[in-house]
Amino acid sequence: MKTTPGHVLTAKDSTPTNSVSTLAGPVHYGFTARTAAFFDAHPAPGGETPGRVVRVDRNRILVAGAAELRHLPYPVHGEIPATGDWVWLGSNLAGEPAVVAVLPRQSALSRKRAFEASSEAQVLGANVDVVGVVVPVDRPLTHNRLERTLVAAWDSGATPLVIITKADLADIADDVVGKVILQSAGVAVVTTSAEQGDGLDELLGHLPAGGTLVLLGPSGAGKSTLINALAGHRAQAIGPVRSGDGKGRHTTTSRELVPLPGGAVLMDTPGVRGFGLFDAEDGMGEMFGDLEELFGRCRFADCAHDREPGCAVQAALADGTLEIRRWESYLKLQRELAALNRRHDAAARRAYQREWHQKVVVAGKSQRAAERYGHELDADRAGGGKRGKRKRS
């Protein structure tokens, strides 16, 4: 949408609505009348104008306001923003522009932090409408990786979408597409060729007005090329892909919002080598709903799906209606979530023990103080009550 100099973009400029909100916001970054109503419903002290986090850097965040982009410091209080967060902009105590509040997230794509011992979540993107799982046709399909990424996509609260890239490599595309459709468990699949412009309109058709799409995929999957094709200009650098293993260099180094011509927003992410799940029970239910139906057909409610008589899972594996690879993938993901839950429980136990230890220490000090006080009283009584005895007036 073109604007004249000095024109302030408001929610009315992007989405027809009966809303009477006159809040001005970053329309090019997904601000719509629905977003304006969300801001109205979540006022914050000192909040003056809406903004959206475009990128999170090491020391500052890049925030889009109604008319400009600003580098601002991290908020002094409250939650640390993530790319895609809606924020209230105002002033700090020194009168400088600042983020004064982060609005509740309507969706959040999270993964377990990279180091194995961690049980913490890393928010990759907030307020995302569609999670695009990018699958290139020029490398072997990793089934477990696709499934775990789709589990995380379902669990984020957004809608998953599988995006096949480099489909101009026609000699292998059909085989990859067929396998992906089978593994995606009902998730929509779009085949694209950024080089030839194929499938781009179909891809954008999955986004609501002003919606946000995040792309997930390994380095060299063609995400940057796809972003440039969707944006209509060179929004991302493009790096070569090694011929030996099909892997590419990380041309994207941070998560950043990229406005698209039709009003939608695209969030690029660095190539994700691993995607550790974080508290993804809801996503597991969406991705493996067929297995949960099988569980309900077992003879025993507490069936371990191993050697029990009347096990529907073992029967499905035996007759081929359940693929052994899919069952093993499910078990692997469940073991990962169980280990994460155990780490969570261990962390909670340690916190409880620290709190209990502190109470014991305080109680011990109080007990020793009470004993000293008791000894002093005994000494006073033995001395005739002279110490500490108050004269009557």
Image (cartoon, rainbow, N blue to C red):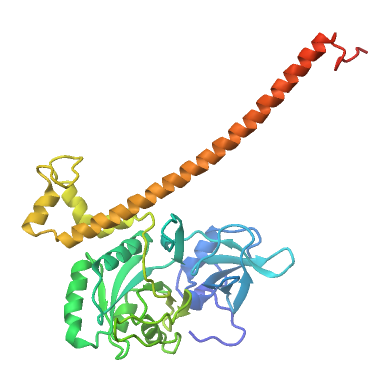
Q: Name which residue lies at 16% across and 47% down.
A: 306
Residue 205 locus on image (x, y percent) = 32, 77
Q: Residue furthest right?
A: 393
* The quadrant where residue 290 appears: bottom left
Q: Name which residue lies at 47% across and 47% down.
A: 347
Q: Residue furthest left?
A: 319
Residue 237 locus on image (x, y percent) = 44, 86
Direction from residue 229 to residue 180 in the image, left or right? left
Residue 28, relative to residue 372: is it above or below?
below
Direction from residue 318 to residue 372 in the image, left or right? right
Residue 239 locus on image (x, y percent) = 40, 87
Residue 179 locus on image (x, y percent) = 18, 72
Q: Name which residue lies at 37% across and 78% down.
A: 219
107, 382: nearer the viewer: 382
Q: Name which residue lies at 78% across and 18% down.
A: 376
Q: How many marks?
A: 0
Residue 374, relative to residue 310: is it above or below?
above
* The quadrant where residue 46 appears: bottom right
For the question of whether residue 51 can be seen, the reply is yes
For the question of whether residue 18 can be seen, the reply is no
Residue 60, relative to residue 351: is it above or below?
below
Position of the C terminus, as image quadrant, is top right
